[in-house]
Amino acid sequence: MELSLNNSNNIDKSLNEQQNNFLNNMFGKVINTGINIGLRATLPDLIEDEVIEIKNAILENGFKART
């Protein structure tokens, strides 16, 4: 059981590193800006900033697996 938890933690760390590397390169920044522009174009003014904040939180923190 402990070995399984260690492997899971290593996978989570590796995934987080890959996400951060992707988001910090130029291609990731272009995609992020494109998503922001698309959200601003399609959403009403009242909620666009909140949706972009949620998107940013997901990108920064990733998705957590349920255990």
Image: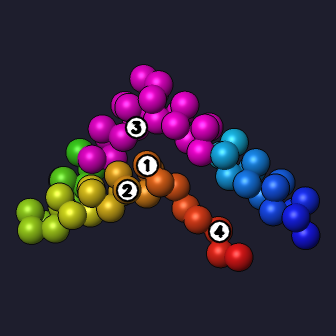
Name the element at disc 1. helix
Q: Which residue is mark 4?
A: 65
Q: Amino acid at mark 2?
A: Ala
Q: Which residue is mark 1?
A: 60
Residue ID at (37%, 31%)? 30
Give the spatial CA distance, label 3 vs label 1.
15 Å
First reached walking from the N terminus: tag 2 or tag 4: 2
Give the spatial CA distance, label 2 vs label 3.
16 Å
Quadrant of the snapshot with the N terminus: bottom right
Give the residue furthest to the top: 26
Task: Give whichever of 18, 9 is nearer the camera.
Answer: 9
The quarter holding residue 9 reads bottom right
Whether pointer 2 and pointer 1 mark residues with C-beta atoms closer than 8 Å, the reply is: yes
Give the residue furthest to the front: 2
Q: Which residue is mark 2?
A: 57
Give the spatial CA distance, label 2 vs label 4.
16 Å
Circle 4 packing at 10 Å, graded few (<14), some (14-19), many (20+), is: few
Q: Amino acid at mark 4?
A: Ala
